[in-house]
């Protein structure tokens, strides 16, 4: 357990320090752009931004990619097994996502308090009523995004560039097929049922109420599938 | 059994057989020279021992524990790599801090002492170091970890003569104190010839020989003289190679010397490890 603790510490602490840099750059950029536009327009009435969490999604996506590239080499050099590396990486994703989701939730609610027109990713869907569910949803969304990119980079590393391109083409083909199915094959009734199901797993019930648990469970299932996929690949991954 | 046991290990890359049913052991408490030409399979085998890549077949045991995906061997083996696997953005002193957390047997104070002897600036980031100092950092870590098996893959790459000398001195001092197994994979055979006790020679994915260095050098010799006399002498001998210059010939032999007659124009000479290595591996390449 001491070894596992040390590798989790390494993963979390070496990634944590960059969070402050990210937020400093983000808020300085937003500040400068707002002031710049305000000065050009001559007033600050309609100046603002929404969905700042999108930036965090990009950041955690990069983290997902680097989670494999740099850390796998370093940790395998230090004698750790792939199982330990995987646990440490997922722990790091959770730690960073949890921290950033907390900051984003607090900032979003503060911005909304100052300027009621501000919309965060969560509030645009579910409103500002439940701050804890806001954090939990955002946390799982960030973990899902990290895990997705981590899985993608593991697959690319495993199968190589050429097969990855083929897989990308096949994936694109599947999306086109699904679009075609919706447009030409499925009946209006089937499409309505699918959309209803999709809305319900996102928490929007048929009776017009919002279920805050369903979207969280959906993301949890998604994260679990991605994590199982990642572990299946990483336990067969060799140092390139 | 206290040893690294390599049992029927094979590894293939597309159409290249990197290791072909390799079996031998690195016994505990000896200094090994793990020798072979470029592409002979040295790094492949080291990477399999260090659980960095997987064998297609066969297994590796470290003190009877499977080396593959097993944290039980974490405190038993350390492998210093030729390639750079460390986080390049971390400072050297931070690397020491983390490695101390990773390995119970890592002596951070000793690492700083060794770094000082090499004039390694521990406040620099890994990527800011020259190639030679990156090797020195990796050596420093390996020398400061007290595990039963330490593997050095091309340890003196990019080091100047003074630093190489210092490394070999520190290595021998360490060995005197701990008597751990040290495995040195290198091309610089003459440099390690006086250090190593055992030699494992690998070529084209197969083990050519494993022997004690002293007995190997006793068995290896060269005979030179007129080509016809050399050819006559070599009948029924294990000739591993020869060189010809006009009518003169030198044959390199492993085995016992035969007494020469008084009229013979032949003469014997001892063979060094490098010559032995070259002659054993030169067939099929330059």
Image (cartoon, rainbow, N blue to C red):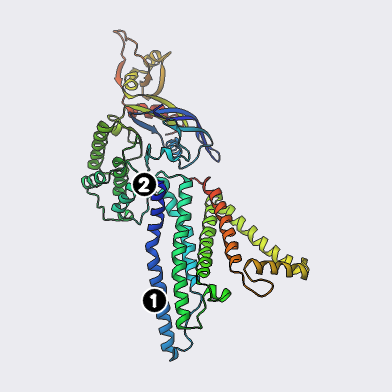
Residue B51 screen position, x and y as percent: 45, 40
Label 1 residue SS: helix
The reply, left or right, for residue B260 in relation to residue A50 is: left
Q: Which residue is most to the top?
A: B262
- Categorize mark 2 by other alpha carbons within 10 Å: few (<14), some (14-19), many (20+): many
- Chain on which label 1 sits: A
Label 2 residue SS: helix
Q: Toward the viewer: A239 or A91?
A: A91
Q: Which residue is most to the bottom?
A: A42
Residue under numbered circle 1: A28
Residue B103 screen position, x and y as percent: 35, 44
**Is residue A165 positioned above or below A77 on the image?**
below
Image-quadrant location for residue A15? bottom left
Q: Is residue B56 visible?
A: yes
Q: Which mark is residue B102?
A: 2
**Is residue B121 positioned above or below A188 on the image?**
above
* Discs 1/2, front: 2
Q: Is residue A68 visible?
A: no
Residue B81 screen position, x and y as percent: 38, 43
The residue sitting at 38% across, 32% down in the picture is B35
Quadrant that contains the C terminus of chain B: top left
Q: Toward the viewer: A236 or B39?
A: A236
Q: Toward the viewer: A113 or B130?
A: A113
As measured in the structure, the alpha-carbon distance from the residue carrying label 1 to the one carrying label 2 is 38 Å
Residue A101 screen position, x and y as percent: 47, 67
The residue sitting at 34% across, 11% down in the picture is B258
- Categorize mark 1 by other alpha carbons within 10 Å: few (<14), some (14-19), many (20+): few
Image-quadrant location for residue B140? top left
């Amino acid at each position: 357990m001491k070894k596992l603790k040390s590798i989790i510490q390494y993963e979390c602490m070496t990634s944590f320090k960059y969070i402050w840099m990210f937020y400093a750059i983000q808020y300085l950029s937003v500040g400068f752009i707002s002031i710049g536009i305000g000065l050009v327009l001559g007033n600050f009435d309609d100046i603002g931004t929404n969905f700042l969490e999108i930036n965090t999604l990009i950041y955690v996506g990069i983290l997902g990619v680097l989670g494999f590239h740099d850390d796998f080499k370093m940790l395998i050099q230090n004698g750790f097994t792939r199982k330990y590396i995987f646990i440490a990486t997922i722990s790091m994703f959770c730690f960073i996502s949890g921290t950033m989701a907390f900051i984003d939730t607090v900032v979003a609610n503060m911005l909304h308090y100052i300027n009621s027109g501000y919309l965060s990713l969560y509030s645009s869907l579910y409103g500002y009523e439940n701050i804890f569910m806001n954090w939990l949803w955002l946390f799982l969304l960030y973990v899902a995004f990290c895990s997705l990119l981590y899985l993608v980079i593991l697959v690319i590393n495993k199968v190589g560039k050429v097969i990855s391109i083929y897989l990308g083409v096949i994936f694109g083909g599947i999306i086109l097929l699904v679009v075609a199915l919706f447009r030409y094959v499925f009946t209006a009734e089937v499409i309505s049922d699918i959309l209803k199901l999709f809305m319900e797993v996102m928490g929007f019930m048929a009776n017009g109420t919002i279920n805050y648990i369903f979207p969280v469970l959906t993301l949890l299932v998604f994260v679990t599938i991605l994590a199982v996929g990642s572990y299946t690949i990483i336990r067969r991954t060799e140092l390139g | 059994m206290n040893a690294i046991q390599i049992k029927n290990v094979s590894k293939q890359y597309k159409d290249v057989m990197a290791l072909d049913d390799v079996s031998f052991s690195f016994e505990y408490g000896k200094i090994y020279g793990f020798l072979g030409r470029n592409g002979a399979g040295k790094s492949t085998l080291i990477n399999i021992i260090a659980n960095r890549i997987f064998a297609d077949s066969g297994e590796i045991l470290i003190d009877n524990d499977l080396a593959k995906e097993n944290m039980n061997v974490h405190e038993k083996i350390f492998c210093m790599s030729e390639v750079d696997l460390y986080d390049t953005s971390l400072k050297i002193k931070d690397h020491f801090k983390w490695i101390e957390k990773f390995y119970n047997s890592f002596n951070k104070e000793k690492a700083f002492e060794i770094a000082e002897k090499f004039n390694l600036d521990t406040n620099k980031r890994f990527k800011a170091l020259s190639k030679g100092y990156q090797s020195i950092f990796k050596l420093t870590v390996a020398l400061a970890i007290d595990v039963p098996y330490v593997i050095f893959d091309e340890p003196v790459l990019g080091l100047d003569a003074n630093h190489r000398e210092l490394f070999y001195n520190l290595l021998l001092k360490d060995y005197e104190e701990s008597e751990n197994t040290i495995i040195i994979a290198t091309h610089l055979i003459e440099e390690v010839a006086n250090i190593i006790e055992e030699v494992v020679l690998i070529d084209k994915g197969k083990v050519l020989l494993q022997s004690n260095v002293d007995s190997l050098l006793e068995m290896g010799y060269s005979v030179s003289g007129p080509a016809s006399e050399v050819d006559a002498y070599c009948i029924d001998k294990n000739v591993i190679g020869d060189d010809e210059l006009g009518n003169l010939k030198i044959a390199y032999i492993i085995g016992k010397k035969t007494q020469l007659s008084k009229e013979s124009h032949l003469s014997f000479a001892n063979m060094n490890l490098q010559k032995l290595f070259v002659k054993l591996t030169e067939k099929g390449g330059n």
